[in-house]
Each structure stands twice: as C-alpha cells, then as structure tokens.
C-alpha cells in the first residue's frame, strides 16, 4: 500500500509537471498594412472584404506578372525560442500573380531574394479570387514544401515579404509554433483583433519608460 501511494504520487507529479511545461502554442496575428515599412511599388490598398479594410500588393493586372521590386518589412517579437510557421491571408488570381519572396531573419540569412532569385525564399501562393489562408512555403524546382523557421532565442525578428509578381495580395500574417498543421483550421489561424492591431502599432519592445527600446535601423544592422 505504501509503495502504491508513492508510485501514484510520482505519476501525478510527472503528469502535472508535464502540464506546466507544455505551454500553449504561440499565436501572433499581424495586419499586412501595419508593417514597419512598405516600399513601393508595394502599396497599401482598400478592400471592404479585407481585415480592417486594407491589404498590400504591387498594383497590376493579374495576367501581367513580372514584379520584382518593393517589399513590406515587419518586426515580430517572438516570446520564446523554437520552431515557427507563417500563414498568409491572401488572394492570388492565377499563375501570373501567385508568388512572393519571403525571408525571416535571423533564421534566414540577410539575403536580397529579389536579387539572388534563391528559390529557398520563393513562396508559391495558393490560387483563389477570394481571401483565403495559405501557409508560406518553399517553391523549389523539385516541388513545393511547407517552410519552418527555427529561432534560438526570444525577441525581435525581421520578416520581409518581397514582390515577385504583381497583383498578388496579402491581407494579414499569422505566426504560430504549430508547425505540424497543414490546414488553416488545424493551425487555428485568425485575423487580427483590435488588440492585435494596438500591439502592432505600439510595438512590443519597450523600455521602463514605455519608449521604444529598439529602432528599425538597429535591428536591421543586428541581423547583417
């Protein structure tokens, strides 16, 4: 009986410790138009069906294609190290308007994918004329594979979404540590709330006086 009670206590201790150490998935929702910087010909545009009525794209006809300049840059403060995935709330009309370049530092190198044309950073966006979720992937010459990023520490990271083809649209970005999800419902994707937008506007890195503790230029240099 004595040893049975001890065994039960050991099992219960292991169980509750497991609960305490297995935290919930990290989930961060971002408005595309609230990027720290949007560089032309990537622009902010209006759509009543988009989250908060706005999205970003390189303006153009879907049948044209041929983008290759312009980008949107985001500072994303991740709360813990680990592996992450990204989802985009997007519209991609056809094969001439269905891709971006995506780098996320410091997991990715400081590389200008628009210049190098490195397919490791090419995102093939799932087609659809209405807003839909698509997980950011590698569009490699050997096929398309879901992307994962590994960060060794918490803190600010630097995401760039660069134009590859005009007319491809991004409304929102969803960040998650659920790298196993292959469908939006599995990843619990969601659009940004008012609170998400407030956090994104005010920034996540602040000092004791409530002022920004880091700057855009400092972060960009830190990842070179």
Image (cartoon, rainbow, N blue to C red):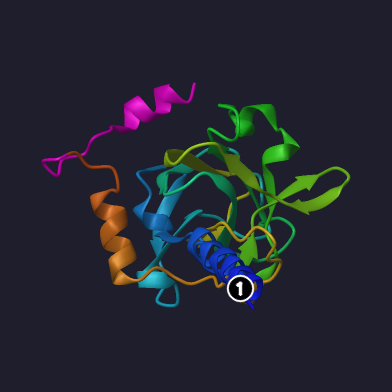
Residue at x 56%, y 70% (from the top left corner): 9
Q: Is residue 133 above or below residue 146?
A: below
Which span of residues is magenta-colored? 208-224
Residue 164 visible from this viewpoint: no
Q: Quadrant of residue 116?
A: top right
Residue found at the very far right of the displayed protein: 142
Q: Is residue 3 above or below residue 215?
A: below
Q: Nearer the viewer, residue 15 or 87?
A: 15
Residue found at the very far left of the displayed protein: 209
Q: Residues within 10 Å of mark 1 (few under 14, many from 20)?
A: few
Inspect the magenta stretch and tell me whether residue 212 lies in it: yes
158 with respect to 6 (left or right): left
Q: Quadrant of the N terminus?
A: bottom right
Q: Is residue 113 above or below residue 196?
A: above
Q: Quadrant of residue 73?
A: top left
SS label for mark 1: helix
Percent of width and height locating residue 222? 42, 24
Residue at x 41%, y 22% (from the top left corner): 221
Q: Nearer the viewer, residue 196 or 167?
A: 196
State the residue position of label 1: 2
Percent of width and height locating residue 126? 70, 64
Residue 217 visible from this viewpoint: yes
79 with respect to 149 (left or right): left
Residue at x 23%, y 35% (from the top left corner): 213
Q: Is residue 135 above or below residue 224?
A: below
Inspect the magenta stretch and tell me whether residue 185 lies in it: no
Residue found at the very far front of the displayed protein: 2
Percent of width and height locating residue 187? 60, 69
Q: Nearer the viewer, residue 51 or 216?
A: 216
Percent of width and height locating residue 169? 54, 60
Residue at x 49%, y 42% (from the top left corner): 159
Question: How many discs appear?
Answer: 1
């Amino acid at each position: 009986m004595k040893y049975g009670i001890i065994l039960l206590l050991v099992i219960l201790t292991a169980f509750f410790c497991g609960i305490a150490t297995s935290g919930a998935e990290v989930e961060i929702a971002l408005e595309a138009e609230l990027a720290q910087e949007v560089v032309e010909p990537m622009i902010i545009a209006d759509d009543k069906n988009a989250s908060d009525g706005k999205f970003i794209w390189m303006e153009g006809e879907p049948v044209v294609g041929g983008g290759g300049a312009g980008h949107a840059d985001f500072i994303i403060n991740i709360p813990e190290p680990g592996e992450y995935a990204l989802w985009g709330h997007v519209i991609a009309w056809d094969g001439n308007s269905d891709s971006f370049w995506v780098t996320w530092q410091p997991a990715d190198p400081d590389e200008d994918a628009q210049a190098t044309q490195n397919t490791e950073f090419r995102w093939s966006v799932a087609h659809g004329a209405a807003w839909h979720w698509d997980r950011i992937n590698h569009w490699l010459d050997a096929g398309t594979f879901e992307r994962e990023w590994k960060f060794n520490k918490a803190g600010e990271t630097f995401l760039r979404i660069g134009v590859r083809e005009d007319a491809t649209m991004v409304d929102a970005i969803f960040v998650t540590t659920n790298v196993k999800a292959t469908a939006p419902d599995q990843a619990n994707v969601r659009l940004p709330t008012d609170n998400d937008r407030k956090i994104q506007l005010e920034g996540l890195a602040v000092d004791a006086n409530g002022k920004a503790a880091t700057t855009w230029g400092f972060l960009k240099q830190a990842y070179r």
